[in-house]
């Protein structure tokens, strides 16, 4: 089976779906890898490094799609509406596509992908089980984003993070608040602590308290309790507007005392809740920084402009999106390892395993034979359930 790695086409995207280091492992399992020329260039993997590991470089995108039984991408069309549409005519019936495909995004775009007949897998749908952990690309990218957000915020802050006792006096440490303690939030806590900040963190899931404390952070306890704070997959759940209003009221004071606020609070398939209002921004000291990692989902801060950095009331509000792409070398390495684990589980003896056999395959399969076949996605899009789903 041939795996094709096209160059990413989203503007500014530096990542690549496979890095040279994973190619020998794939070759051992019987895969050949073809790579579009220059696909790894921006991530620090020139053509020659792929050739050294046994991959073949092809001169253009169309040739890679034509040669590949399996196409692997970081951002597939549905995650890349800017330039991804050009890939639709290159996909064919029975071909496999694995990528970030925003399965809870636009129904129309997902239908367009389905109509190509491609068998697509959305990495976002990976079950959060121990067996699937090595394939969990969302966690990999969240780890990178949480780390990078702290560095960018530290750079934008007119203060330093650590406490310093110098001949010129004592400098107090920066106070960093993390709102939303999933994978990105935990990495942000760890990174801010390493830089010497005093770190507090809040999440509506009380279960994370111990994790925050084990990283040396203070868990902010608010006197409100979320109903069913965590769903069966471990995600935070959506709450009603009254809950969010109360949260904002209680968070106001903690935010006003913080030099840096990093927000990561999201709920799958929903717009991110607004937890930091314009009024709260006004209450922060001038020079403070908010990095809104929920920007691409609408933002946790009322004043965030997705994709931009703005200064409001003297506070720098960073709404950068696609943050993992800013660390392309390691983001690609982690993603490539996630994909390799997934591929080695998906294909046995040169054939795709039936989805009924394996929850990882069944839960990530998005489209097949012209239809959206994923039960969770069909329910989300209010499409009728498919009778024979998951049995082939
Ligand atoms: P996420 O990106 O979906 O959300 C980030 C955080 O925002 C979550 O912790 C969520 O509780 C929080 N949040 C949502 N609404 C909020 C609100 N109104 N106020 C405050 N916080 C709010 O989360 P994630 O990084 O995908 O992680 C979700 C969970 O899954 C975590 O418990 C994580 O440890 C777990 N996880 C498990 C596995 C595994 O078992 N294989 C892998 C990865 C993550």
Image: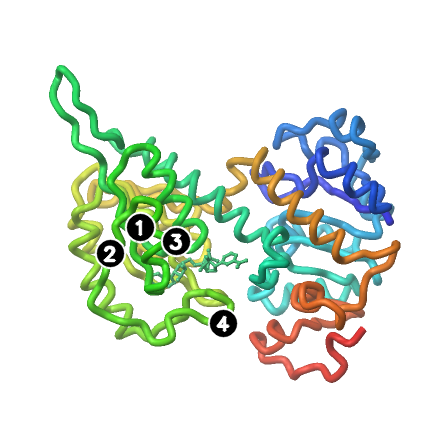
Residue where numbered disc 3 is placed: 264
Q: In terms of secondary structure, where does tag 4 sit? A: loop
Horizontal and vertical percent for residue 74? Answer: 64, 47
Specify whether residue 63 is in view. no
Query: Disc 4, disc 2: CB below 8 Å?
Result: no
Separation of residues labelled 4 and 3 (CA atoms): 20 Å
- Ligand 1 quadrant in view: bottom left
Colour scheme employed for the rendering of this structure: rainbow
Query: Disc 4, disc 3: CB below 8 Å?
Result: no
Q: In terms of secondary structure, where does tag 2 sit? A: loop
Separation of residues labelled 2 and 1 (CA atoms): 10 Å
Mark 2 or mark 3, whichever is nearer to me: 2
Q: In terms of secondary structure, where does tag 1 sit? A: helix
Residue where numbered disc 1 is placed: 213
Mark 4 or mark 3, whichever is nearer to me: 4
Separation of residues labelled 3 and 1 (CA atoms): 18 Å
Residue where numbered disc 2 is placed: 220
At 56% from the left edge and 62% from the top edge, which residue is drawn? 128
């Amino acid at each position: 089976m041939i795996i094709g790695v096209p160059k990413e086409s989203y503007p500014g995207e530096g990542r690549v779906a496979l890095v040279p280091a994973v190619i020998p492992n794939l070759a051992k399992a019987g895969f050949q890898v073809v790579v579009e020329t220059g696909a790894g260039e921006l991530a620090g993997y020139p053509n020659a490094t792929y050739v050294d590991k046994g991959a073949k470089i092809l001169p253009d995108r169309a040739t890679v799609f034509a040669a590949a039984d399996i196409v692997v991408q970081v951002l597939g069309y549905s995650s890349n509406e800017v330039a991804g549409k050009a890939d639709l005519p290159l996909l064919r019936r029975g071909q496999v596509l694995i990528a970030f495909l925003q399965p809870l995004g636009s129904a129309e775009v997902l239908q367009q992908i389905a109509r190509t007949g491609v068998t697509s897998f959305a990495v976002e749908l990976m079950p959060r089980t121990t067996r699937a952990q090595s394939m969990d690309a969302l966690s990999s990218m969240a780890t990178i984003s949480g780390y990078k957000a702290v560095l960018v915020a530290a750079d934008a802050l007119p203060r330093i993070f650590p406490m310093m006792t110098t001949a010129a006096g004592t400098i107090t440490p920066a106070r960093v608040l993390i709102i939303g303690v999933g994978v990105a939030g935990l990495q942000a806590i760890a990174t801010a602590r390493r830089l010497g900040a005093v770190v507090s963190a809040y999440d509506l899931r009380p279960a994370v308290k111990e994790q925050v404390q084990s990283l040396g952070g203070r868990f902010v306890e608010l006197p409100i309790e979320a109903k069913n704070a965590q769903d069966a997959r471990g995600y935070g759940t959506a709450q009603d507007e009254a809950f969010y209003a109360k949260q904002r009221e209680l968070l106001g004071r903690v935010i006003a005392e913080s030099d840096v606020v990093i927000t990561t609070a999201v709920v799958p398939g929903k717009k991110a809740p607004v937890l930091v209002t314009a009024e709260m921004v006004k209450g922060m000291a001038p020079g403070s920084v908010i990095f809104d990692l929920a920007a691409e989902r609408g933002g946790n801060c009322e004043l965030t402009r997705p994709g931009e950095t703005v200064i409001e009331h003297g506070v720098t509000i960073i709404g950068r999106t696609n943050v993992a792409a800013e660390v392309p070398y390691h983001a690609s390495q982690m993603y490539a390892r996630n994909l390799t684990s997934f591929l080695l589980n998906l294909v046995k003896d040169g054939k795709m395993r039936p989805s009924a056999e394996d929850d990882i395959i069944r839960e990530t399969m998005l489209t097949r034979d012209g239809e959206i076949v994923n039960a969770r996605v069909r329910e989300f899009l209010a499409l009728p359930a498919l009778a024979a789903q998951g049995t082939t």
